[in-house]
Image (cartoon, grey):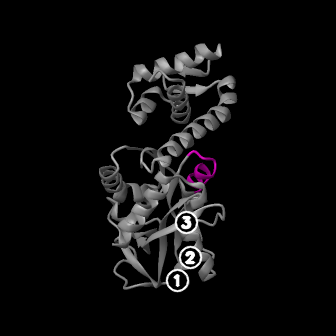
Amino acid sequence: MNTSQNRYEIFLKVAELGNITLAAEALSYTQSGVSHAVAAMEREAGCLLFHRSKTGVTLTANGKKLIPYIQQLVSRQHALDQMMDALTKRVAGKLRIGSFTSFTAIHMAGIIRDFQAQYPDVSIELVNGPYREIEQRILSDRLDCGFLSGTENDALAFHPLFHDEMFAIASVSHELAGAASLELKRLNEFPLISQFSGSDHDVQQIFRTAGIRPQTRFILDDDISVMGVVSQGMGIALMPEMMIRTSSFELARIPLEPRQFRTIGIASLPSSETTLLVRTFIKYCKSKYSA
């Protein structure tokens, strides 16, 4: 806890979350331990690195200047630790995984539990976020790998795991409720509730493939908001089966004709640029979902 390396990791997590308590919980440290680590860095730097307030902390101008250097230092130390383990073929160290909401809710607990049962010397850091954010974190070496619904980024290797069917959803009182299917060409007949760009590329791919320009009524932040508004009869939406499974809203689910799917997989840098730990985790995931 007193090493410079741990202080740097704590600094980055506090900067990311903007809250001492949340950073302590994410890193499994005590709140006082995180506060002391931040204070030690500020003494070392000779200036304040965070502004404190009742709602949390924000980086000072000097703190912002340190971010890229500390990220680089932590990434290099992380790579060194994994390389040292790889020299002895030992699967150990910290694995930084990105994921998205519905996958995390349904799959991540089992994946982490079973993988750590096989490799008890591995610790896991989990980050939830939009697809593009996960891709950028992998490319900038802030994540080792991440679960995505496909990727168009040629710099990443994508390993497909399974298919997740896409459905139209509507309120239970909507005219489509109870329909056996909905032809793609009819999607533009109904007001659409959608998500902001970056979180909806599965849906946009369906529209592009079908040559459809939808009647977008609202663009919302997240899937839960979309499903809530749809359940109140404000429009329809396209939603993957995995997300619908997590919903507490009463919704009608209508299959699309022809049926549409998204591909869930795990992305990383190319195999030649990844560590033994990352390659072992990807192999484990592929085995788990091919069974």
First along the sequence among labels 1 and 3: 3
Residue 20 x/y as whole percent: 46, 26
The residue pinned by badge 2 equals 206
Crowd class of label 1 (few under 14; some 14 to 19; many from 20; radius 10 Å): some
Q: Is residue 236 above or below residue 178?
A: above
Amino acid carrying label 2: it is Ile
User: Which label number is shown at residue 271?
Assistant: none
Amino acid carrying label 1: it is Leu
Q: Nearer the viewer, mark 3 or mark 2?
A: 3
* Count of residue discs: 3
Amino acid carrying label 3: it is Phe
The residue pinned by badge 1 equals 184
Q: Say what secondary structure mark 2 lies in.
A: helix
**Circle 1/circle 2 CB separation < 8 Å:** yes
Residue 184 x/y as whole percent: 52, 83
Crowd class of label 3 (few under 14; some 14 to 19; many from 20; radius 10 Å): many
Q: Nearer the viewer, mark 1 or mark 3?
A: 3
Q: On the picture, is 114 further left or further right than 208?
A: left
Q: Is residue 139 magenta?
A: yes
Q: Which residues are magenta?
A: 132-142
First along the sequence among labels 3 and 2: 3
Report the residue at 60% width, 39% height from top.
Answer: 76
Q: CA distance from mark 3 to mark 2?
A: 20 Å
Q: Main secondary structure of the magenta part?
A: helix
